[in-house]
Amino acid sequence: MANSKKKDVVVAEDTATESVDKTVRPVKKSVKLDDTVLINVKSNTYGTLFFRNPRTGDATEWSHFGDVAQLTMGDLRAMKGAQRAFYENQWIYIMDVEDAGYEDVTADDVCKALMVSQHYKNVLDPDNFDQIFSWPESKVKERIAMMGSGVKMDLVVAANTAIKNGRLDSLKRIKLLEELLGCELDR
């Protein structure tokens, strides 16, 4: 009888271990986006931004900061291969997937599929540059340190515009931005 009880205990322990393993490991879906999927891409650059796909010859032009254009995943992959600076300098901001059936795919998912996520950690949407002017000093220092040179230049333009419009009027904040961005802002 003692042997049959030991077997029951061992079986119960194995079952418990199996159920724990199933709940501990959440399944992470991998996003597969073929080259025809349309992606909304925003210009993160003041002035004109231009990209020509070297594979297809298709051209995309953003005339102003914040303009949105639709590019295919194939275009974005070609951009990564031919002109990586678009991602490294954060000249573009990936917004979302335009095509139906991809509503649950986020901009982060697109960046992961393109393998450019490292360039977009803690990136600030260009439409929300004014947020940075009200952040605590430590957060401003941290976020500006992570920005690419292109985004820093755009932040200089945004700061000058905010000063001109009266949205940025703290002398202390202006001096901090000048120090972190390595420039002299209009006062």
Image: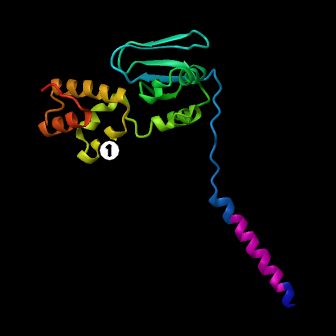
Place of residue 5 in the rendered image (x, y in percent of width and height, measured from the top left): 82, 85
165 sits to left or right of 122:
left
Position of residue 166 measured from the top left corner of the image (x, y, whole percent): 15, 28
Q: Residue at position x 68%, y 62% from top?
A: 21
Q: Residue at x 66, y 65 (%)?
A: 20
Coordinates of residue 139 in the picture (x, y in percent): 29, 45
Q: Is residue 90 left or right of residue 181?
A: right
**Above/below status of 150 relative to 106:** above
Which residue is situated farthest in the front direction here?
A: 182
Residue at (45% x, 35% y) in the render: 120
> Mark 1 sits on what residue?
142
Q: Is residue 139 magenta?
A: no
**Residue 104 x, y percent position in the rendering:** 56, 36
Identify whether 165 is placed above or below 171: above
Position of residue 173 relative to residue 15, above or below, is: above
Chief SS of the magenta region? helix
Which colour style is shown? Answer: rainbow
Q: Amino acid at mark 1?
A: Glu
The quadrant in which the N terminus is found is bottom right
For residue 160, what is the image quadrant? top left
Using a 10 Å C-alpha cutoff, classify the residue at mark 1 as few (fewer than 14 neighbours), some (14 to 19) or many (20 or more).
Answer: few
- What secondary structure is found at the residue carrying circle 1? helix
Q: Which residues are magenta?
A: 5-19
Q: Image check: 143 left or right of 86?
A: left
Question: Along the horizontal axis of the image, is 162 left or right of 86?
Answer: left
Q: Quadrant of residue 105?
A: top right
Task: Using the rendered image of the protein, determine whether residue 149 is visible from the camera's viewpoint.
Answer: yes
In the image, residue 7 lies in the stretch drawn in magenta: yes
Number of dots carrying numbers: 1
Query: In the rendered image, which quarter is residue 78 located in?
Result: top right
Residue 103 visible in this rendered orientation of the protein = no
